[in-house]
Amino acid sequence: MNAAARKAAIIGGGVIGGGWAARFLLNGWDVAVFDPDPEAARKIDAVLTRARASLPALYDRAMPPEGTLTFCTTLAEAVTGADWVQESVSERLELKHRVYDEIAAALPKGGFISSSTSGFKASDLAAKGAPVVVVHPFNPVYLLPLVEVTGAEDLRARALPVVRAIGMHPLELKVEIDAFIGNRFQEAIWREALWMLKDGIATTAEIDDAIRMGFGLRLAQMGLFETYRLAGGEAGMASYMEQFGPSLYWPWSKLTDVPELDAALVQKISDQSDAQSGHMTIAEMETLRDDNLVAILRGLRRTGSGAGGVILAHEQTLPMGGEINGLPVTLRQSVPVTWTDYNGHMNEAAYLELGTWATDGLMQLVGADAAYIASGKSFFTVDTRIRYLDEVARGEVLSVTTQVLDGAGKKMKLFHRVLKADGTLAATLETLLLHTDLTTRRACAPEPEVATRLATLAERHQDRAAEGAGGAVGQRD
């Protein structure tokens, strides 16, 4: 079945269910949602608005055409014909069992149920005979790639390729444990934080600063064991364990005990949390969170580290190319927050970066790809002129077409048109490059195959107008 025609049924449209709906929808799946909450459509629409502005901004290729979203009046309607069923109802075992009975009655033959549960084992969920596998995500589901997959081996095997195909990283747990791996770590930190609050050692803001200003940044790209390996210096993990292992027996932590969440402690946490971030609405905080995650994830994407490697691998499965008005599309992507300035508009440096990757796309078209560069030849930019014709904001989808103005000898002169989704011309970039020998660092003729492809494109484009090309700074056309 064509991936663009596949259907995901989302049972429960809260924070997690809405995140799943966005993740599937923006990866080209049709999505059917069932949630009796009369506010479900409004809540999911808010999630989709954030997801549309953030998830595509992680990639330098266009994501598939968005699927169709349907809100169903019955659970059976949502599940009928579904290729994937994601249950995200409240964490009450008896409720989940009731829902599974309803889902099982409408499941397609051979279908199964994926549960977003945060802590129940799959064997507990499947105790009454429903085919259930745990596929536990992290919020926001549309941005964070990790899913913990646990349950029967045959169901795990069927779930893994689906979540990979929508850009996620499945962590397969072959041994069932309560709360899985990620939540056990989060609960450990949470317990320790509660004790420090109760004992008056630190405030909510101080605890959050300790995480976000320090070890949280390290863990985002290396994890725990690689971070501690570095802490051991040149001798590595063995040295770390020798130096710091004994501290495990020191009375630093109260992780084996839990403070009583009495009214006084709950009020203390609530008051400090209000003082810390009460100046922002939840919607503002969610947008800020998404912008921060996009910036961090795009940084990791550059090096392929951690979650950045997942994005790069998924990007290779996304289609590229195509034409607009007879010109090749050399880049199509959403504008990430990292490309915007204090006015909320795309800044000058971002246009230059956009043009850089569009040039790279044209180079791949003519055969000057990564393998060609590795062989010792490439094109170097020697001049660029940019015209800014319309404002561009965060989250807008831009397509770049490239016209070859000159492809003779050592020269490659390109004219990029930056187009908004409605066809508005937002900018043009005219750039001149020289073919270069990377060993001598001197200009030289391209290899015959590259030269032929470049000349063919130049000939094909020679009779086209290129309004704005060849002008001086300040000249509009």
Image (cartoon, rainbow, N blue to C red):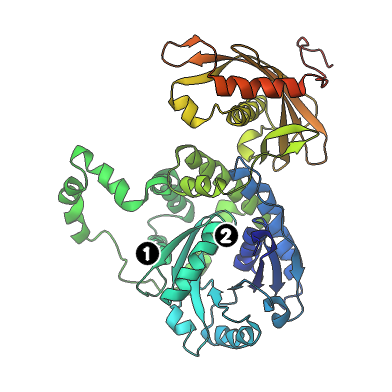
Residue at 37% x, 64% y is 188
* Residue 192 rendering spot, x and y as whole percentages: 37, 62
Q: Amino acid at mark 1?
A: Ala
Instruction: Tell which residue pokes out farthest to the bottom in this image.
Output: 128
The residue closer to the viewer here, 279 or 78, is 78
Observer-side mark, 1 or 2, equals 2
Residue at 69% x, 66% y is 31
**Residue 286 quadrant:** bottom right
Write down the residue under mark 2: 141
Write down the residue under mark 1: 188
The kind of secondary structure element at disc 1 is helix
Residue at 51% x, 14% y is 436
Residue at 66% x, 40% y is 333
* Residue 190 rendering spot, x and y as whole percentages: 42, 63
| Quadrant of the snapshot with the C terminus | top right
**Residue 366 quadrant:** top right
